[in-house]
Amino acid sequence: MRTSRCFFGKSSWKQCAEELADDRAMLVIDHRIKELYADKLASFKKNFQNVDEVLVKNPEEKKSLDFVKILAEKALDFKLNRGDWAVAIGGGAVLDLAGFFASIYKRGAKLCYLPTTIIAQVDSAYGGKTAVNFGEYKNQLGSFYPADVIGIDTSVLRSLPKKEVYNGLGEVAKYVMLQPDDFVDAKGDIESILNGDISKYNNLVPLCFRIKEKYVDDDFFDTKGKRVALNLGHTIGHAIEKQCKHPLGHGQAVAIGLNFALFVAFYKGKLGINDATKYYELLKPILPGIKYSVFTKYVQQNLCYDKKADKDKLVFIYPLAKGWATEKVTLNFLNMCWNKFAEVNGDVGYFKRG
């Protein structure tokens, strides 16, 4: 099985470049990174024998078979071979797109990830899952194809707009809920980041990376019922993400999904009110200020397309006081829970007060 070699810290891009030195590469770059880090990119590129690049504007919109075709045409024009590199530099959508392309180009090109968002660093870069969207449905076409080399440099996170910070912290919260032993420190780090202390990324990013590494290494192909935990919050997250006039980024949609998951766990008696409230207080600063009822019709329409759905049932993941659990529930039950959840706008404390 393919394995990933990972480098952390300010020198991680340089270390990746040394791994790839004197080879040929096609870089798939978020156009904003090209503008923000021109010098850093120039330093990275000088290590290659020959290099070409493709700039990606609005990466989530480009995460499609149509753009994979554009990458393939560019690679063929460049005469990219199987032993050459595809290098993804950007957020999760760029990594997904370039990773899927690399997995099918001549049955597999070499692959390097240089993630530049919180979500990409804590979630997308490691684990081998690649995907593109199909029509309006997210991540329906994909492959298992780990990057050969990954460089995690948290210094590039300092340029993230506030919206991307909130998005990233939604995924961070997922890992904290999966491993609540680190809850107190992680909650404090999240609050510090929201108050402008970006040094705390140096704590949170490696923590989340290690947690994901454990689940991936135990269940790489997602067949043993362990890696499914990483979908905590994603059932609702995917159902509502960018589905209406109130578009959400992935991480904030997941944050709502996490809120819903703890709501369901509390409703079913799997999570006590104190733990449910504790998790809710973790999520509260990063939840979008929006009425959840605006998403109701999208939840009803899209739950059946979840990857864990089977006929009229779905494997639902919810948090426990320590860890997580899964249960097969009906779509009708989840829709009923969503209606109750939307009625109180996700506030589990409503039941404590009532």
Image: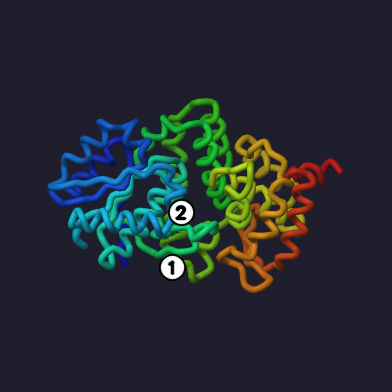
Query: With respect to residue 251, does 79 lie above or below?
Result: below
Q: Is residue 110 above or below residue 41?
A: below
Give the residue displayed 21% in from the left and 44% down from the top: 17
4 versus 286 height, above or below: below
The residue that appears at 65% across and 55% down in the rendered structure is 320
> What residue lies at 22% left-to-right and 58% top-to-bottom?
76
> Could you say which quadrant of the image residue 338 lies in?
bottom right
From this viewpoint, which residue is outermost toward the bottom? 311
Quarter occupied by the C terminus: top right
Residue 27 visible to the viewer: yes
Q: What residue occupies the far top of the structure in this picture?
A: 196
* Tag of residue 60: none
Please state which of the two labelled residues, at mark 2 or mark 1, is closer to the viewer.
1
Pointer 2 or 1: first along the chain = 2
* Count of numbered circles in the view: 2
Rendered image quadrant of residue 69: bottom left
Report x, y in % for residue 347. Answer: 75, 43
Q: Is residue 91 left or right of residue 47?
A: right
The amino acid marked with disc number 2 is Lys
Amino acid type, callout 1:
Phe
Secondary structure type for disc 2: helix
- Whether residue 80 sits left or right of residue 256 in the image: it is left
Q: Name the residue carrying label 2.
A: 212
Residue 172 drawn at (x, y percent): 52, 44
329 and 322: which is toward the camera: 329
Q: Position of residue 234 (x, y in %)?
A: 58, 55
Q: Which mark is residue 221?
A: 1
